[in-house]
Image (cartoon, helix red, strand yellow):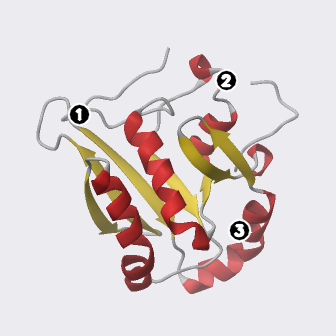
Amino acid sequence: MTLTKIYMGKTSFDLEDKIVRDSLASLSAVEKFSPVVVGGLAVQIHCRKSPGLLRDTPDADILTLENMPYEQFLMEVYPSVEEYLKDNGYQVQPKRGRGNHCVKVMDGQNKPDSKTFFVHWTNFGEDVYQGFRDYIVKQIKHARTESIEGIPKVRVAALEDQPGFDYTKPY
């Protein structure tokens, strides 16, 4: 059983939620950037055959090799993702965050059963990016293409490349 945080509607999800699946499917609209799912949602994708072990997440973390400025994100990534999600009935908003560019995906805005999910596209300051470049390249190089029913193929960071993962310990 997974726990769900409720605050003005649902804000924490797992891979079975339509808003998550549609958000992942929207990545196919920007394949040229080779987006890779990292973090909690990547773990969910790898462990999807054991859903009772998963914890919910409020977002999808996306890593790309290119460290793009917000203006480039708005021109080259956001329009395709926005079109895909709007065509599937969502309200969508771009947001600039610290260390990421965000697509806020909303379903049933301002209603008790509303849903809000965030797709964070990692973006580092140039000095930080250079310091993490080898790690980023490793995550992207080791990413696996996963087939998830009803979703175009998704690239996912290898489980062993997730920060804090220690395959020598039982979980």
Check whether the beta carbons of the residues at disc 3 and disc 2 lie within 8 A of each other.
no
Give left or right: position of 72 versus 124: left
Q: What amino acid is found at the position of numbered circle 1 in the picture?
A: Tyr
Residue 47 in the image: x percent, y percent?
A: 67, 30
The residue labelled by disc 2 is: 49
The residue labelled by disc 3 is: 136
Residue at image position (21%, 36%) is 114
Q: What amino acid is found at the position of numbered circle 3 in the picture?
A: Ile
Quarter of the picture containing the C terminus is: top right
Residue at image position (47%, 69%) is 99
- Residue 166, above or below 157: above
Residue at image position (42%, 34%) is 13
Q: Give the SS element for disc 1.
A: loop
Residue 144 in the image: x percent, y percent?
A: 75, 51
Depth check, front residue: 16 or 87: 87
Depth check, front residue: 163 or 71: 71
The residue labelled by disc 1 is: 7
Check whether the beta carbons of the residues at disc 2 and disc 1 lie within 8 A of each other.
no
10 Å crowding of disc 3: few (<14), some (14-19), many (20+):
some
Q: Nearer the viewer, mark 3 or mark 2?
A: 2
Give left or right: position of 166 versus 23: right
- Residue 49, above or below 14: above
- Residue 1, above or below 118: above
Residue 77 in the image: x percent, y percent?
A: 44, 73
